Image (cartoon, rainbow, N blue to C red):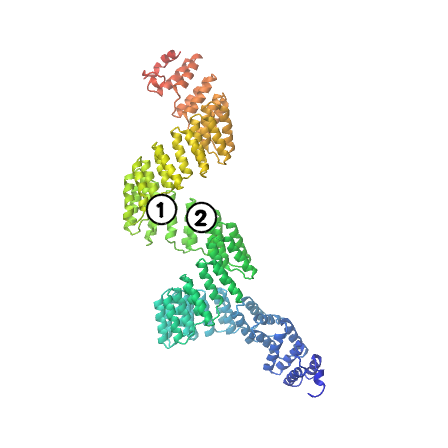
Amino acid sequence: MDSSDIPKKLNTGVIRSVIHNNRFINPKRLLDFFIWSETKADNNFNDLDLLSLLVILLCNSNSFLPARDVIDRMIKTGKTFDVLSSVVECYRRFDGSRNVAFDMLVERYTKMGFVVEAADVFLGLRDVEFFMPSLLSCNSLLRELLRTNKIGLFWKVCDSMCEMRIEFDVYTYSSVIDAHFRIGNAGEAKRVFLEMDEKGCSPNIIVYNVMISGLCRVGLLNEAVHMKKSMSVKGLVPDNYTYATLINGYCRGKRLEDAKLVLSEMVDEGLKPNIVAYNALIDGFLNLGDLEEAFRIKNEMVCHGLKLNLVNYNTVLKGVCKAGKMDKARKIVNEMIRAGSQPDARTYTSLIEGYCRQRDMVSAFKMFDEMKKINLVPTIVTYSVIINGLCGSGNLDQANHFVQEMISCGLKLNCIVYHPLISAHLKEGKVEAARRILDRMRELGISPDVFCYNSLIIGLSRENQLDTARNYLDDMLAKGLQPNAYTYGAFVHAYSKVGDMKMADRYFNEMLCYGLTPNVVIYTALIDGHCKVGNLEEAFSAFRCMLARGIVPDVRTYSVLISGLSRIGKMQEALGIFSEFCEKGLIPDVYIYNSLITGFCKQGDLDKAVQLYEEMCMKGTGPNIVTYNILINGLCKAGDVEEATNLFHGILKNGLTPNNVTYAIMIDGYCKSGNLIDAFKLFDGMPLRGVTADSYVYNALLDGCCKEGNLDKAKGLFQDMLIKGVASAMSFNTLIDGLCKSKMLLEANHLLEEMSEKQIFPDHVTYTTVIDHHCKAQNMEEAKRLFLEMKAMNLAPTIVTFTSLLHGYNMAGKTYEVFSLFQEMLATGIEPDNVAYCAIIDAQCKEGNLTEALKMRDEMLKKCFPRRLCTYDTLTQAQCAKQDFPQALKLLNKIGEAGLRLSFTACSVIASGFQCAGDIDKATEVLDRMVSNSTSLADLIDGNQKIPYSEHSRDLIKQMA
């Protein structure tokens, strides 16, 4: 046959025909023929229909191994859907009697690593009427889907099994329970566990172990222990895996003493702890930083005849490196080599990370080079550790170089690599560079994780770019990422810091809506924000909410509450919180004491402030320089400069150094008490203490000199400030005010011009000061010029600026300017004050606009401004000028009701008016009021004669007549 022409005629059609026509003979012979045909034709016949026929025939005759090999060949050469369709069609056409072919198809896809395709085949067969998968095949697929974390497909396969009414066994249930725990659904896992008994499927040791492992994973350790105890009711005995799982769970929950008790119980039960159990304990103590206990357990492990393997050594090494014990780490490496365990990439990665933590990048690079020399390929974790170390050291250029090296080595970059790069750029304030890194990740097909987004959101929030930060949060949500407490905490912190509590509350509530629990730091930020805007009710509402959620306030929380109450003067309430704080056994820090001392100093209760100072010293909470500054400032403001001086001298005795603020307060105190000699002594002694005087110190001295009228000294000090570059707008304002008060207006003007030359820009205080004094000196043209110059510099005039000008123009008799300026003031949105109203009323009266003047008077009264005698004097004289003496008398009565009295001139004019009109009774009434409000005639006229009785009023009228 080999020598005939038959091999030349072999093709797919011929082979299919031969196999089809002989399908009732031994299928193994048909398979042999197929293989022989391929050999002779020197061709691979990968026809799916032909291969499917062979599979069906082989399975029908129980020739499963050869069938498996054919299926493997089909999987390698054909598309999943095509393979499945072909097998189904052949099964139908050629009367397949064993649907094991389909189980085998699913099983081979799974074993060859094509888990998704295996699930697709399984799901594709559910509508095939003759397909009923074996439970073994289903369980195998479910296990593999779990192992590869294909949870979505897992549930689809489970649902399909239910639709086909396939009864679950213990292995199916164990997989379902495990899946529920993997997605954090402990409640559903427990429900399924209870359902097993209801359906007559008694849990075995495997199911119990899955339950215990799952409960430990979600932190329900007490329930896991209870589950272990309930095993005995079912006649089951915990095995090594049970105990090792509990030990690992306790270690992850940082309940290491409980883990040790489980280990002891394990030994008592006659079980030998394995390497896994010991490794969990060693790792747990190392994570807590308890190296001594970790090494004790390591030695105990060796005593029990267990030899440390590479995993154990790497666990110990990682913990030692994390603790920064690099000398000990090198000894462990030497020990492991002597024990026959050769360091691997994980070993060197731990060493590199340890050196990076210590910012010893030279040693880190030495380890990196060493691992390369012994042909250990650095992993993505190794590179990530180095990049993180470089970012932490601020060496961003070299970090980027290592990123490029990773790419050239063919390593796939991930979020772990990019996250430290983003964080490092944000730490240096390079927000845009950090954003470009995130964009680059997307270009490379790397989806940023929560940590990358959080870094950007936190960085942007710190820079107050909150709208951009919100865009990234929306992007997170759109991508299905779950924000955490740090995400929302960034917004709460940022908005609370700027006082936008409406937005801070919004993000706080949004956080709660997502089921996230705010931590003590977030609550404290929210409370602090409400306190700073003076909303103590909301602050305490947040505090109560915090307590209700079982979150324990820390020192910082109490500190912001006490500070908030102290800031608004609620000192008794602040002391109440302070007492509650101390009753809880918490130790007040210096910031809490400083808040209380500040509050009492503001209220002028220096005795209580000093009492708190003495209490903190007695309790060992050392005062800092801020404490001294607060007390010294309080004493100086209370005028007790002597006691402030004693406290100042006590600073050095307590090992502290006065700072610029301390000197500024003391010097200002001396100056305000008129003691310029001691102020300058203190100033001259500053260099000896290594403290350089700043603008605040100089300004305090400058103000003192100006108030004492010592302008020569002030000018000398000011020139010194200019030379040293510490002169500010306040310095110029202080000297300008001093010059103005000394009537040196020309010199004040020159100083104003000099400000611009020195690149120090005048403010509204500067201009208002000079304008006010020019108005008082009736230099109205100069005042007007300065006013126009002020507006040209975009400096908004204040009410003081306008009232100075209104008063000046009114005194100069320029009523038109008064009216114009008053309208301009109203147009700028500035509400008139008492002085402004007096000026405009006086100007209206001068122009005879009595109706307008009275209208202004009524407007003034509606705003509850205090009544001023000069205003009524002006109005009365204006009414007298119009011969309206009855209205003048009404005003006089209103003045009396207000406890005021008109001048002699106004009263004389009213009395004379009534006398001339022949109304002697009214004239007498006016003079009676004059006499009742006076004790001497000197109050009425410029003489000294006493007028003790009102009956002399008629005689006085005769004199006046």
- On residue 497, which mark appears? 2
Q: Earlier in the sequence, mark 1 or mark 2?
A: 2
Q: Which residue is tagged 1?
A: 595
Percent position (x, y) of residue 852?
50, 24
Q: Nearer the viewer, residue 305 or 749?
A: 749
Quadrant in which the C terminus appears: top left
Q: Nearer the viewer, residue 726 or 613?
A: 726
Question: In terms of image quadrants, where is residue 699?
Answer: top left
Q: Residues within 10 Å of mark 2 (few under 14, many from 20)?
A: some
Q: Amino acid at mark 1?
A: Ser
Work out how far the residue at label 1 is from the one at label 2, CA to CA, in angstroms: 18 Å
Q: Amino acid at mark 2?
A: Lys
Residue 631 can be seen in this image? yes
Percent position (x, y) of residue 694?
37, 42
Classify 746 as above or below 606: above
Q: How many marks?
A: 2
Q: Nearer the viewer, residue 797 or 579?
A: 797
Please indicate whether residue 394 sits to the left or right of residue 25 in the image: left
> Circle 2 sits in a helix, a strand or a loop, which is it?
helix
Please indicate whether residue 864 sits to the left or right of residue 37 in the image: left
Residue occupying image coordinates x 69% and y 79%: 12
